[in-house]
Image (cartoon, helix red, strand yellow):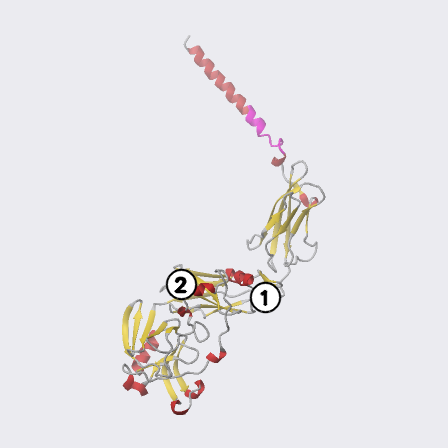
Amino acid sequence: MNQTPRFRTVFRCTLLVVSLGLVATACGDSDSHPLSTKPFDAAQQVVLNTPKAGTVDPDKPLEVTVKGDEGRITDVTVVSDDGHHLAGELTADGTRWRSTGSLAAGAKYTAKVSTEDGEGSPGSRTVAFDTSPAQRFLTVEFGPEAGTYGVGQPLIAELSLPVKDKAARALVERGLKVESRPSIEGAWHWVNDEVLHYRPKEYWPAGATVNVASNLRGVKVSNKLYGGPSKGLKLTIGDRIEAITDASAHEMTVLRNGEVINTIPVTTGKPGFSTRSGVKVILGKEYFVRMRGASVGIFGSEQYDLPVYYATRVTWSGEYVHAAPWSAGSHGSANVSHGCVGMSTGNAAWFYETVREGDIVQVVNSIGEEMDAFGNGYGDWNMPWDEWREGSALAAGTRDGTSPSDSARLRPRV
């Protein structure tokens, strides 16, 4: 007696499961809904403005339209072979799609168009096409040469053609990729229409690796001008070497990674020829240089013609750190040079062997003019960070730079 109700309950549950199974089977019928069917070929439904023969003009937008009133476009995806998606907009009624981004020149694309007919059945069309190659190219040459440099070395990007338009400059900057390990905050600065410098907010970290490359190939920069192929660059950053010259104390203090490794008696520029103040970056080293006063416009009683050894260049106009045995009596006590930092031959040889390109040479307590940011070497670090960023097209504003003066590339002075 007590088991009968229990049996009926189980029986009813079984019927319910069977009933639900029948309903689920009916709802899962693959032929009962138009969206579950295989998309039809929409080749007769939609038209792309790609020529049947030849290539697509990358200066013109790509368009996809529906023929007459034969349904609507539901989605368009256009991707280049290197994975870049082309942006576009679809009209509200689904009758036309038009690209809003720029096609790359000399590239291969695949366009996938999804549609619906008047009854809601899905359609699909896939079209592959090429874009015609560019006639004018913008290429980038990066500097310095690959190698190991000091923590003050800026990156240089020299463009093959001038870029003046702010929007085009922003596009160029986005295409110049800088990656460092460890990562740092940095920015490009337009020196002029054809040259950009890149530096971190602070000096590069010692031991860092830096890679710079251009992603502009095929990208539209401006009307009929496209990015061309450019070779990337890899740098390694060495120890943090800083040589701080106190012109009033007649002394140079050399630090490696924050620790003093040498203190050297020196002489700097005398009145009328005072050594430039500020941060300079070592440009190169020359074991022997013939220094002549006439080559930098010094004549009369101040004229000189001297053989100079262990010369480390810090400006294009001829400022060096070098051996100056003729002024040995003034090292550590008086400033008697024509702008260079002079020291004994032994100290100059040590300095020459210790430093590398990109290391920092800073002059303090000098009455000389301030080191320019550009045009006479790498004075980039003398520009405050906020001002540096103003020279980026991706920052608040772009400051028009001036070309480095060729007149600054003069011969040495002592």
Look at the numbered disc 2 and give the secondary structure of its residue.
Answer: loop
Outermost residue, top side: 1
Name the residue: 56% across, 25% down. 23
User: Mark 1, residues whose alpha carbon is within 10 Å: few (<14), some, or many (≥20)?
Assistant: many
Q: Start and end of the magenta stretch?
A: 22-33
Nearest to the observer: residue 315 or residue 368 = 368
Q: Is residue 31 magenta?
A: yes
Q: Is residue 232 magenta?
A: no
In the picture, measured across the screen, residue 173 lies left or right of residue 363, that is: right
Quadrant location of residue 267? Answer: bottom left
What is the CA distance from the residue labelled 2 to the residue labelled 1? 32 Å
Tell us which disc is closer to us: 2 or 1: 2
In the picture, measured across the screen, residue 267 lies left or right of residue 134, that is: left
Look at the numbered disc 1 and give the secondary structure of its residue.
Answer: strand
Q: Which residue is mark 2?
A: 201
Asked if residue 133 is positioned above or below residue 320 in the image, the reply reads above
Quadrant location of residue 296? Answer: bottom left
Q: Amino acid at mark 2?
A: Lys
Outermost residue, bottom side: 300
- Mark linked to residue 137: 1
Q: Amino acid at mark 1?
A: Phe
- Mark linked to residue 256: none
Image position, residue 340 (x, y; %): 36, 81
Asked if residue 88 is positioned above or below residue 8 in the image, the reply reads below
Name the residue: 36% across, 73% down. 361
Considering only order in the chain, which callout, 1 or 2, is on the residue closer to the N terminus?
1
Picture quarter with the N terminus: top left
Name the residue: 50% across, 64% down. 398
